[in-house]
Amino acid sequence: MTTTHSTEVPAKAAIPPAASTAVRVQNAVIKYGFIFVTVVLFLYFALSEGSFRESATLLDTLRYVSVAAILGLGVTFTMAVGGMDMSVGAVAGLGVSVAAQSMVVHNQVGAVAILAVLAAGALAGLLNALLIVVLKIPDMLATLGTMFVIQGGKLILVDGQSITPGMTMSDGSTAPGRFTDGFLRIDRGTVLGIPVSVLIFGGLTVIAWVFLARTRWGRVLYAIGANPEASRLAGIRVGAYRALAYVISGVLASVGGLILASRIGQGDVSAGTSQLLEAVAVALVGTSVLGRGRPNVWGTALGAVLIGIITTGLTIKGLPYYTQDVVEGAVLILALVFSFTLSKRRTS
């Protein structure tokens, strides 16, 4: 006696139309919600405040966020490998002090100051890499330690005082140099009406995107962040790539320091202190853009633009400066909801 087995595949359970619609709406919110929030806020300020619509205001907004955005790009690289760089603000501040020390105290030209600042950023990144890759200290703890060392070190470098042209030195002499005109153009100059710092921000964003999204090295960085052990078993030199991410972050932070130094025109010892939180915020906000749920360059850039829109809009409306922190914090929480809470519900 033979038996026959049906080869028919059981039909999938029908999804109720209401549930299907709810899923589509949720997916749309996750993917486009943050972009929608950015557009809505921009339109609100543009329609309610005439000065917000002026091209000069929009360019000033991009110029204002350029430093936090560039630092945020560095944080994005370290997040790609599963880490976090908490020293970017201190490295940017160190760049300000090194630039002022080079030009004002040692009377060097702007090109020498730029090279010195970039070298200082690379060394800071190497120090982080040494602590994290070689000495196996957790990323956040290592970079926090570096942050404090750099903040104290730059005070020692300048004897605890801001460096200004014509200042009296500790030996009683007068500082012989000044910030050169060419150096000051880094933030104060324009090309075809666009601030140089905005062009630097845009150029570095494109370069970072090509590196992370279109090269093998970028794909390896993401692979390490997703599963470092599997990457190691696949023959990837995980330590070398993680070190590379932190060196890149240090160099990008030093570029932010160059813009800051050009902006303020002196070696302010407090420079860079407030940049850390904004840099981390824009990088975290960027993870929610297009529902990717992972660090990405264009998301970081959009996060910086959103922070700039909020800050500029609230300033024009005359709200106290301390309310901006509340709004920026609320936006960050919203972005994290998009990135983690809603996306996990979608995949569960």
Image: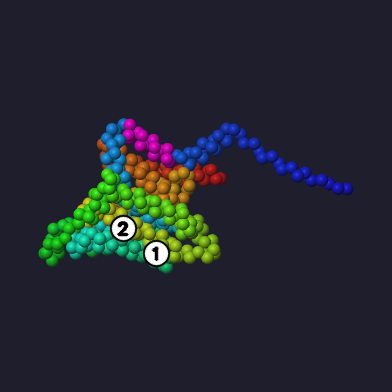
Quadrant for the C terminus, please: top right
Q: Please name the predominant secondary structure of the magenta segment in the image.
A: helix
Q: Earlier in the sequence, mark 1 or mark 2?
A: 1
Q: Quadrant of residue 12?
A: top right
Q: In the drawing, does residue 174 fall left or right of residue 48?
A: left
Q: Which residue is mark 1?
A: 129
Q: Nearer the viewer, residue 92 or 140?
A: 92
Please give the name of the residue rendered at 39% of the width and 37% of the height, measured from the top-left corner.
39
Label 2 SS = helix
Q: Nearer the viewer, residue 182 or 61?
A: 182
- Estimate the x, y position of residue 165 in percent, counting from the top left: 16, 57
Residue type marked 2: Ser
- Estimate the x, y position of residue 204 in percent, counting from the top left: 36, 53
Residue type marked 1: Ala
Is residue 68 magenta-colored? no
Q: In the drawing, does residue 103 fall left or right of residue 336?
A: left
Q: Residues within 10 Å of mark 2 (few under 14, many from 20)?
A: many
Q: Nearer the viewer, residue 303 or 275?
A: 303
Q: Nearer the viewer, mark 1 or mark 2?
A: 2
- Estimate the x, y position of residue 78 in percent, counting from the top left: 41, 57
Q: Nearer the viewer, residue 177 or 133?
A: 177
Answer yes or no: is residue 105 visible: no
Label 1 SS = helix
- Estimate the x, y position of residue 239 in percent, counting from the top left: 45, 65
Please name the colour scheme applied to the rendered image.
rainbow
The residue stretch that appears in magenta:
34-47
Please give the name of the residue rendered at 32% of the width and 43% of the height, measured from the top-left corner.
308
Q: Quadrant of residue 317?
A: top left
Q: Which residue is mark 2?
A: 254
Q: Kindly report the distance in space between the C-alpha atoms of the residues bearing marks 1 and 2.
A: 16 Å
Q: Quadrant of residue 310?
A: top left
